[in-house]
């Protein structure tokens, strides 16, 4: 090491010069490691945000599709009930005339002139049944039979609810208000309204569909033993 006239200390040691050069013109190994780590964290955060966004979009699309299916299925059920024709029949060996209409908690049957599939003309016997599905869910299926014809079609309407059931509005002539029952026992009368319940845990949806054509056999036209009267 030698000193110059200006008082600056100089050295001929190459290691000393290299260390000074690296300390002023480049990154140390620690700085490089920290930079790479921060860059990796930023990339992970961005990928996580993108994944959450994709899941949100997929979840939103699934909800929209589910709501659209519910709306379409309810339109089908509403249209068939609103187009109900109170046809009746006589059981073989019996004299009593009965409606085709049957209503239970998880079963609904009625006659209508509105077919889901269209095509064949004539009266349709529509049957809605609640069946067990997968993962604790229930299924509401519908089948159609064209009366006096060997034609039957089936479809699934709902399959995302834990519980599905029907109720029927009964009003005795002596009652002022009426009440809901989960089983229709009147064979010569049709309920004034039908209510459909959907449940998922504590959440419940219910739809009330009024029956346009209702009354007793003495009030409506009859379709007995395959012939109109």
Image: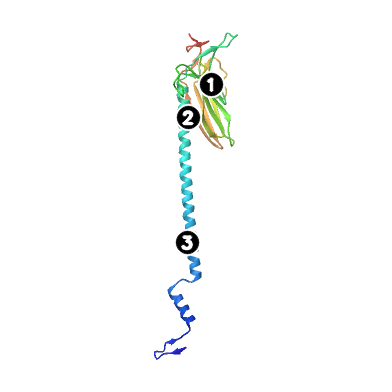
Tag 1, which secondary structure?
Answer: strand
Task: Please tell me which of labels 1 and 2 falls first in the chain.
Answer: 2
**Which callout, 2 or 3, points at the residue further toward the start of the chain?**
3
Q: Residue at x 47, y 59 (%)?
A: 42
Residue of label 3? 39
> Does the residue at mark 1 contact the one at mark 2 (Cβ under 8 Å)?
no
Q: Secondary structure at mark 2?
A: helix
Q: Determine contact: label 1, label 3, CB under 8 Å.
A: no
User: Which color mode does the image show?
Assistant: rainbow
Residue marked by disc 1: 109
Residue beneath disc 2: 73
- The image quadrant that residue 72 belongs to is top left
Question: Residue at position x 47%, y 65% from top?
Answer: 35
Furthest residue in direction bottom, as rendered: 5
From the viewer's side, name the closer residue of 83 and 182: 83
Residue 220 screen position, x and y as percent: 47, 13
* Circle 1 residues within 10 Å: few <14, some 14–19, many ≥20: some
Crowd around label 2: few <14 · some 14–19 · many ≥20 (10 Å): some
The residue under the point 45% across, 44% down is: 57
Q: Nearer the viewer, residue 155 or 172?
A: 155
- Mark 1 / mark 3, whichever is N-terminal: 3
């Amino acid at each position: 090491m030698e000193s110059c006239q200006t008082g600056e200390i100089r050295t001929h040691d190459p290691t000393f010069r290299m260390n000074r050069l690296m300390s002023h013109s480049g990154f140390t190994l620690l700085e490089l490691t920290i930079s790479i780590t921060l860059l990796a964290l930023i990339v992970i955060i961005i990928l996580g945000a993108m994944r959450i966004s994709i899941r949100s979009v997929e979840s939103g699309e699934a909800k929209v599709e589910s709501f659209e299916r519910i709306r379409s299925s309810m339109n089908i059920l509403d249209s068939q009930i609103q187009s109900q024709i109170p046809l009746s029949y006589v059981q073989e060996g019996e004299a009593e005339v009965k409606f085709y209409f049957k209503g239970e908690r998880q079963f609904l049957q009625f006659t209508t002139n509105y077919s889901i599939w269209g095509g064949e003309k004539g009266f349709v016997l529509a049957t809605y049944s609640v069946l067990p599905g997968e993962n604790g869910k229930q299924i509401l299926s519908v089948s159609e039979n064209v009366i006096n014809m060997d034609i039957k079609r089936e479809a699934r309407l709902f399959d995302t609810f834990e519980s599905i059931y029907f109720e029927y509005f009964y009003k005795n002539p002596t009652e002022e208000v009426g009440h809901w029952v989960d089983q229709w026992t009147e064979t010569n009368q049709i309920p004034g309204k039908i209510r459909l319940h959907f449940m998922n845990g504590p959440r419940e949806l219910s739809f009330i569909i009024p029956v346009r054509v209702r009354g007793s056999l003495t009030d409506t036209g009859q379709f007995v033993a395959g012939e109109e009267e």
